[in-house]
Amino acid sequence: MLKVDDLQVVYGGVRALRGISLEVGEGEVVAVLGNNGAGKSTLLRTISRTLSLHHGTVVSGSVELGGKAITGDAADVVRRGLVQVPEGRRIFGDLTVDENLRAGGLSASRSRRAAAAARVYATFPRLDERRDQRGGLLSGGEQQMLAIGRALMSNPKVLLLDEPSLGLAPQMVDFVGALVRDINATGISVLLVEQNAAMALEVADRAYVLEVGEVALAGVAEELAASDEVRDRYLGVAPSPDVEPVTAPSVPRITTGERTPKPLRAEGVTVRFGGLVALGEVSLDVEPGTTHALIGPNGAGKSTLMNVLTGVYQAGEGSVRYGDDTLTAMRPAEIAALGISRTFQNLALSHTATVRENLLLGRHRHWNAGFITAGLRLPGARRALAEQTRIVDGIAETVGLGGKEREPLSGLSYGDLKRVELARALCAEPTLLLLDEPVAGMNHDESQEMARAIAQVRETLGITVVLVEHDMPFVMGLADRVTVLDFGRVIADGTPAEVQQDPEVLRAYLGSSDTANSVKGDLKS
Amino acid sequence: MSQFFELTLSGLSLGCIYALLAMGFVIVFKATNVVNFSHASIVMLGAYLVASWNDSLGFFGAMAASAVVCAIAAAALDVIFVAPLRRRAGGTDAVAILTIALNILLGTLLARTVGTDILPSGAPWGAETTSILGARIPQTRIAAAIVAMAVMGVFYVAFTRSDWGVSMRAAATDPEAAALMGIRLSYVAAGAWAVAGVLAAIGGAFFISFPASGVSSSTGLLALAAVPVAVAGGLDSPFGALIGGLVIGVAQTLASGYQDHIAFLGRGLGEVIPYAVLFVVLLWRPSGLFGTKEMSRV
C-alpha cells in the first residue's frame, strides 16, 4: 500500500533521515517508534508532502502509494487516499466541531461527505453532542477524537497518526489504542508514530524503531515488545552504562571565579496556561554539586519547569530559591547573572559562525572590552580577545570539541552541535547548569560520549547539573537523583534505582493496556 | 449642531467606503498572512476602469466589469509574484516589502495613464443631495453605504456558511493542518486576493464619486488610507475593518469640516487624521480594536 525506499532528508545542512525503508501493507497497522529527533516527524512530513513547509529537502529515495510515486502537494496526497493526523492534534480552534469535520471533507464529493460525517458522529457520540461548540474549547481527549474524525472525513485508504497519545491521560491513551484497531477493522491501513511504545506495540501488527534517522530495529510488534533492546530503550532497565568519572582532569580549570554552587529549592510551583495546569505544586530539591535528572513522558511539564527555573515563565504560585536568591521574583538576565546557564532542547546556535565564535558569544558576560576599544581593535581589546579565545578553547577541549574550534557549525554533526551548546552554556561559568534534552536525537554511542562529557564537566568544575531527558539509560547512568513528572505533578523522587522500581513510574511510561477495552466501552456508552 | 450632525452622517458614509477598501486588505491578511500594500493600486485600477467604461457600460455595468478585471489582476499578482516568494520561505516582512514594490510599480503605471486628467466616476446620482433630518447628504454616499452593507452581509454569510469560507478560515487558523486535510492553500490564497480585488473595485468606484471629483493620479495615494483603517480595526478582523472605517471616516470628516476652527494645526489636516487615529488606537490596543493578540503556542 505504502512503500518508503531508502529515504534521505536534510534540513539545511542537518541530516534528519539517513536512508529509511519501510512498508505498510494493505489492512496493516504499522508502528514507528523512536525518541525525539529520531526522524519520525520528518518521515511523516515526507510522506504527506508537507516537508517543504518545514524547509526540508529529499536528497534521495522514494515514497510510493499503491505502486505509484507520490507527487504534488499535501492536498494532492489527500486526494489519493492518504491523510495524516498531525502531532498535537492541530484542530481548527476557532471553528466549530461541525466546521472542523467539514474542513476535513472538502476534498470529497458532497454526497460522500454527509455519509462520512454520519459515520464519524456515530463513532464519537461526544462530538455529536458538541457539534456547535468551538474546537478550541474541547478537552484534550475530545480534540484528539476530533482530529481523527476530521481525517476520516476524506475516506482515506491510509491513515498516518502522529503521536496520537501525546499529552493524554492513561485512559484516553487506551481509548486511542482501541480506536486505531477499530479504524483498521474498517479496512484502513494505519501508520502509527508513537513515543508510547507500550500502546503502539499493543495495537500494531509490525513495528519499526527509528534512531537518528535510521531504522534501528524492525519486526513483528509482539516480538519487539518482548525484546530486551526495546525494553532497555524505553524503560531504562538496562545495566547502567559505564560512565567513568574522570578524577584526574586533563584540562586546565576553567573557572576563575570564587563562586560555588548553592542548593536549588523549588516549592509548590504551579504554572497555568489558560485553563491548562502545566505544573501543579511541584517541589524539588537539588543538592549543590550533584547531577539531578527530571524525567517524564511528553507533556509532563519538564520543559515548563526548566523555563520557570530560568525565569522565562512566571510561576502562578510557589517559589524557586537558589541559595538566598528567589529566582521566581527575578528576570531571566538577573538569573543568568547568578551563574545559572542553560542549553535548549532544539539547537539555538548561529550556524554560519565557527565553534569558537559561538563560544565567544557565550563569554559575553565576562567581556570587559568596550564598544569603542573593540571597534577600533585597540591593544586592550586584542589582549582581551586572546585571553577569551584561550578560555573558550579550553572549554571546547573539555567537552570533546578539541581541534574543531575553527570549523563552521554548518559542517558539524548533530552530536557535535549538541556539544557546542553544552560548551556555550559553560562559557558563562555557571555554578548551576540546566540541560534540556542534551542527547535528544543522538544514537547510543553518541549519548554515551555525551554522558562522559557531562560527567567530566561536573567533576572538573564541581558545578550542579540539572537535566531533562527522555533517554532512560543515559539518565540512569548519570544522575545522582531523579525526579519524575507526569501531567505536571511529581510522581516519584529518589535515586535512579528507587525510581526504576516505582510502580507509578512504570505505569506512566508503559500505561496499562488491560483496561483499554473497558475504558473504551465507558466512553462509547 | 446641525453642522456636526451633517458631518457625522457624511463621515459614517465615508467610513463605509473605507470599510470596503480595508476589508479587502483584511481578507488577504487573514487568509495568507500577507500585509498587502498593493491593494491601494488595485483600488485605483478599479476606480480608473469604472471611470473609463461608464460611458459605454453605464456606472453599474462598468463597476461589474471592473470588479471582474480587478479580481483577476489581484489573483494574478498573488500567483505570479507573491506565491513563489511564500513557497520559498519568504517571511511576512519580505512579502510585505514585495507588495510595496508592486504598489509603486502599478501605481506609477496607472498615474501615468491617468496623467493630469480627472475622470469622473459617472455615478448616476451626480451631485444630488438628500436631506435626512435636516442634514444634507450626497446621494452617492447613501448608495455607497447601502452597497457596502449589502456586500459585507453577503461576504459574512459566505465566510461563515460556504465551503469557501470554511476552507479559508481553516487555512487562516493553521495552514499546515489545512493542507493535511486536503485544502489547497494556493487556491485559498488566490481566492482571497480575488475577493479583495472585487471589494477594491466596488469601493474604488464610490471612493472617487461625489463629493470626490473623480479618479486622478493621486487616487492610489489616497486609497492607502485603507491601511490605517485595517490596522486600527485589527488586521485579522473583518468586523474591525467596518468599525475602523467608520471611526476614521467620521474623524476625518469632522477634522476637515471644522478645519477653520482648528486652523492652528495647519491646512489639510483631514489627510493626516487616519494616521493620527491609528496612532492613538495602537497606543491603547496594540493589536487594533478587534484584532486577536499574538499568542505563542504552548
Image (cartoon, coloured by chain):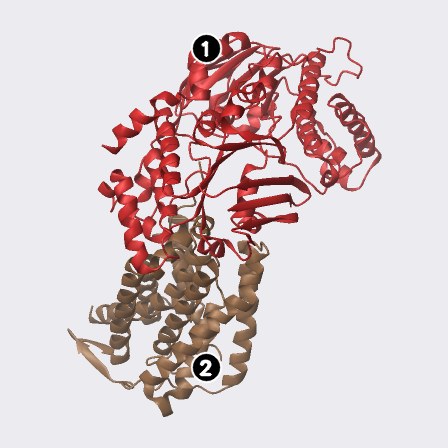
Q: CA distance from mark 1 to mark 2?
A: 80 Å
The quadrant the C terminus of chain A occupies is top left
Residue closest to the far bottom: B56
Residue A255 lies in quadrant: top right
Residue A342 lies in quadrant: top right
Image chain in brown: B
Residue for point 44% across, 86% down = B118
Residue closest to the far left: B133
Label 1: state its secondary structure: loop
Camera-side residue: A387 or B6?
Answer: A387
Q: Is residue A306 visible?
A: yes
Camera-side residue: A350 or A62?
Answer: A62
Q: Which residue is mark 2?
A: B216
Q: Which residue is mark 1?
A: A502
Q: Is residue A428 visible?
A: no
Image coordinates of residue A457 in percent, x first then y, are 70, 17
Image chain in red: A
Image coordinates of residue A136 in percent, x first then y, are 33, 41
Q: Chain of mark 2?
A: B
Q: Amino acid at mark 1?
A: Asp
Q: Is residue A436 left or right of residue B241?
A: right
Q: Chain of mark 1?
A: A
Residue closest to the far right: A379
Residue A189 lies in quadrant: top left
Q: Are marks 1 and 2 on the same chain?
A: no
Residue for point 30% across, 68% down = B16
A141 in relation to B183, above or below: above
Residue for point 53% across, 55% down = B92
Image coordinates of residue A9 in percent, x first then y, are 64, 44
Label 2: state its secondary structure: loop
